[in-house]
Amino acid sequence: MRRSSTSRSSQNILCNLLAPLDIGHIKLSCRVVLAPVTRCRALNYVPQPAQVEFYSERATRGGLLITEAVAVSQAGIGFPHSPGIWSSEQVEAWRKVVEAVHKKGGIIFCQLWHVGRASHTYYQPEGYTPVSSTAQALPKQFSIRLPGGVMTEYSHPRALATEEVPLIVDQFRRAAIHARQAGFDGVEIHGAHGYLLDQFFKDGINDREDKYGGSIENRCRLAMEVIEAVSTEMGQERTAMRISPVIDHLGATDSNPHALFLHLISQLNKKNLAYLHMTEPRFNNKGARGLTDTTENCSKFREAYNGVTMLSGGFTRASGMQAVHTGAADMVSYGRLFISNPDLPLRFAINSKLNAYDHSTFYTHDQFVGYLDYPKLSSEEIKQALSEHRKTTDSAIHMDELISIETSSPVCAQALRIPRPC
């Protein structure tokens, strides 16, 4: 079974999140990943200077960042001020983000996204109707955010005609080309959380009678065509996939999700993708995430996949360590904790206190408040945390197992310049 280049029998590597890992030809310094976090700061769908700073602040040497969901076309937009990558202006703006991350030695993947029916005519070009696998509207319990924070019902979608589906594939293909032009190290295809590809996966939504509906194989067809198109442009080892096999967010239910996603994974095993990203069920329909310590829910899918896996969904430092230690995941992505702690890998390394996040600022358009105003640890705080850490016995991680992490603090850089565990 192909997994990472790191041996699972080497416990000193697997016992903590700060061990190195190879994904394809990319060498990561640790397994703490910035999850894709929608922040609604890209005015007119174009990344702003604030986005350059946001990603740069979270970049570390060899650390992996995944962008917020990036729409492959305007029809794929479903949030106010979400970024896209369909225009030359957007490509140039993303290039600045990528260059800033690379300057820090970081790795950055672009998450490619189409929301499908999870949209509103307000966001659609010329006010067109949102498209999906179906003409079924989203359940009334769900609402969409319009500019200004107004919440309203999702617009009623129309089902894509069979001959239109290849146009969606081409939008993803062109987005991959643009991501490559912007300098991204790879792309992650968003096939989760009730958005377009998930709307084709799940038979609670997909009621088609053509080659994209009915059987499990047919319902996976669009995703596999997208993967083929994107990986042709980016390379398989620089293409990743995100799925949510145990989540029915936005009404994305299925009569047999176990069989569905085991089939999908059997097809993904024929590829040589960078990784498979799965969301644990601590992400729910109300958007609430509890910071729990269980990781068993995606285990059967992780075991079926032959490549590198990533989990996300309310993980703490302790549960992330446990997930890697037990083999439940090779990497763990953090959203809210990384929003409020730009230096999260460092804080995990020295077991430092964490800044609390402010949910009320998650989806505003303010280019600073709740976006760039979360502090990193000061030199004195790093010294104190290191001192306290050395006094305690931490069963999950020991100081001689830490790896070097590039930060803005010379004190931290010196303190953590310890030989790698492999």
Image: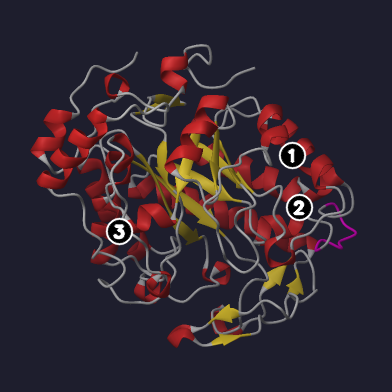
Q: Which residues are magenta?
A: 205-211
Q: Which mark is residue 264?
A: 1
Q: Amino acid at mark 2?
A: Phe
Mark 2 highlights which residue?
201
- Of residues 62 and 71, the one nearer the viewer is 62
Is 97 left or right of 226, judged from the image as shown? Answer: left
- Please report the residue visible at 76 percent of the width from the left and 46 percent of the height from the top: 220
Which three-letter amino acid code belongs to the residue tagged 3?
Glu
Out of 346 and 267, give the one closest to the viewer: 346
Give the spatial CA distance, label 1 vs label 3: 35 Å
The one of 218 and 361 positioned closer to us in this rendering: 361
Which residue is identified by label 3?
A: 92
Closer to the chain start, of discs 3 and 2, is: 3
Q: Is residue 207 magenta?
A: yes
User: Residue 335's spot in the image, x, y percent?
Assistant: 44, 54
Could you tell me if residue 46 is visible in this image?
yes
Residue 292 drawn in magenta: no
